[in-house]
Image: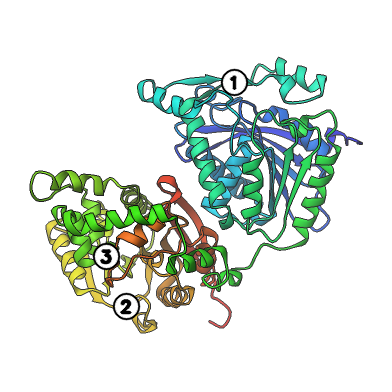
Amino acid sequence: MKVESPTAWSQIESGFDSVDQTRLFYRTWQPKISRPDGVKRALIFLHRGHEHSGRIQPLVEQFGYQEDWAFAWDARGHGHSPGERGDAPSFEILVQDFDAFIRHIHLRHGIQPENILIVANSVGAVIAATWLHDYAPRVRGVIMAAAAFDINLYVPLAKPALRLATCFKPGLFVTSYIRSSMLTHSPEQARSYDQDRLIAKSISARVLLDLADTAKRIVQDAAAIDTPILMLAAEKDFVVKQAPQKAFFERLSSPLKRYILLKDCYHAVFYERDTSEAIEASRKFIHECFLQDPLPPHHYHNADLQSHSASQYAALQNGATGSAIGKAFYGIQRAMLGTLGSLSNGMAIGKLHGFDSGASLDYVYRNQAGGGLLIGKTIDRGYLDAIGWRGIRQRKAQLQQLLAELIIRYQGEQPLRILDIAAGSGRYVLETVKRFQDKAIEVTLRDFDAHNLEQANKLADHLQLRTAIEYQQRDAFDPASYPSDEQPYDIVIVSGLYELFSENAMVLRSLQGIARQLKRGGHLIYTGQPWHPQLDMIAQTLTNHRGAPWLMRPRPQAEMDALVASIGCQKIASQIGIAGIFTVSAAQKSAEPAAGD
């Protein structure tokens, strides 16, 4: 294959600040000739585990898009980026780093996400897949080569043993068993790998286990991803297993997807003796991706009726999910809730008001176990420590952080106006505002339940707030709740509401009302629940605020973001919670009037 001269690009070395202000290293290949149509496009390369961006140069040349930009980073703990070699606080921070990298490229170089295509290998492919699932970026497509959804550890019970070992030694590292001869048939590429002093041969056991847990979640819920995907699997891959790659591919909702098994190929797909098939397939896929636009927002309006999540929800409604053994176990849990549940303060509140009610959530936020008799407090502690409730508390902290950032950024001359359309007890808003008593802020708290507003009023008194607060009993889904003649708001919050309702028509009515009351250039903070690992258990044991079984349809992040985009608000930030269950996002309304305004 003809390799174009590297002089087609100017290579630049630089850095960007990630979410925790850690400065990570990256390389840019800037084309010396612009595209005739003037559009800036980019390929972004994610290196394999242990490696670094210096090994990407040959790929940029082989792909040969001389009029397009190319970027590659050194992941945290790799190459020239800081951190102990092969380590990171968690696998999730690597995904956050990548999201920050994309946003940096957009802001620094003016390249729109829809003009970006990702090329990711091995562990890099899992970072990209997790990013697609959790952040739902509108990139043009992703090429995944030998995705490391399940690494071959060979040693029996290796993962349980590592989990046990990290309990005693949290900083445990695992030395890679991989030899260069297991990666490629090419003697030249094998020598290059062996002689590269920047390649880290160890990986943190914590990151390795996080990777395994995250990959399992992403493969299981791959149907939430609809970005165009090309998967290149190696037939003779000694490093990662093929079956999870195939399962991930088959579950994808992508309208454009390809799966190619490369015969007699080792793990280092793009560093093999013969890369012609992989490169040719990649170039053809890239061409197809840029021929079609990303899915428009209205594509998702009927996703509550026609999508994988809709089918899953219908099965949940019909009791067609789970096994007979599982249903029997949940029956026992339901019986225990009916008898012993009242000993737990949290369960008693859930049984009375609904486990999804404002009263229940406020108790979860307080996180102070209590109950009757000697066992009640212990039961309550277990209840409050359930993964969903831990995620709810993290969601509160993330929401308060986003709200505080927007309050700090506000520079208007008039008082900052904040509206929460379904505030419950208003705890996250009122506690945040308490820290800004020196600013002129006006708060409006709305809720359908008068009891919740009474509790919010009591909390405001307890916090001794001097902020002007108005309480309004309104239905967040009623268009009449959003009169256009009211003074508009700078920030509107909708938290923990849309997750409770499957119907997109209801959500759109609410969002359209928000659009009428949100200032141009104002911000919307909204939460999402893209997935949940305990849907069956919740549906068969807990009741909602209406006294019915608590059935949930996780709304994929791409769908939630599209509904928000339908009212002229563009997402500017997202934060992901424990196990990816909850998300908190901020979107900004266009400062320009919409057509017809």
Q: Amino acid at mark 2?
A: Asp
Residue 121, compared with residue 426, is above or below; it is above
Residue 127 appears at what percent x and percent y? 58, 41
The residue labelled by disc 1 is: 176
| Viewer-nearest residue: 217 or 31 | 217
User: Which residue is found at the position 66% from the left and 50% from the top?
Assistant: 249
Residue 305 appears at what percent x and percent y? 54, 73
| Viewer-nearest residue: 183 or 189 | 183
- Can residue 425 be spotted in the picture? no
Q: Element type at marker 2?
A: loop
The residue labelled by disc 2 is: 475
Which comes sooner in the sequence, label 3 or label 2? 3
Distance between the alpha carbons at the discs numbered 1 and 3? 49 Å
- Farthest right residue? 2
How many neighbours does mark 3 have within 10 angstroms: few (below 14), some (14-19), or many (20 or more)? many
| Viewer-nearest residue: 144 or 99 | 144
The residue labelled by disc 3 is: 357
Distance between the alpha carbons at the discs numbered 2 and 1? 57 Å
Q: Element type at marker 1?
A: loop
Quarter of the picture holding the N terminus: top right
Q: Amino acid at mark 1?
A: Ser
- Can residue 583 be spotted in the picture? yes
Q: Amino acid at mark 3?
A: Ser
How many neighbours does mark 1 have within 10 angstroms: few (below 14), some (14-19), or many (20 or more)? few
Q: Element type at marker 3?
A: loop
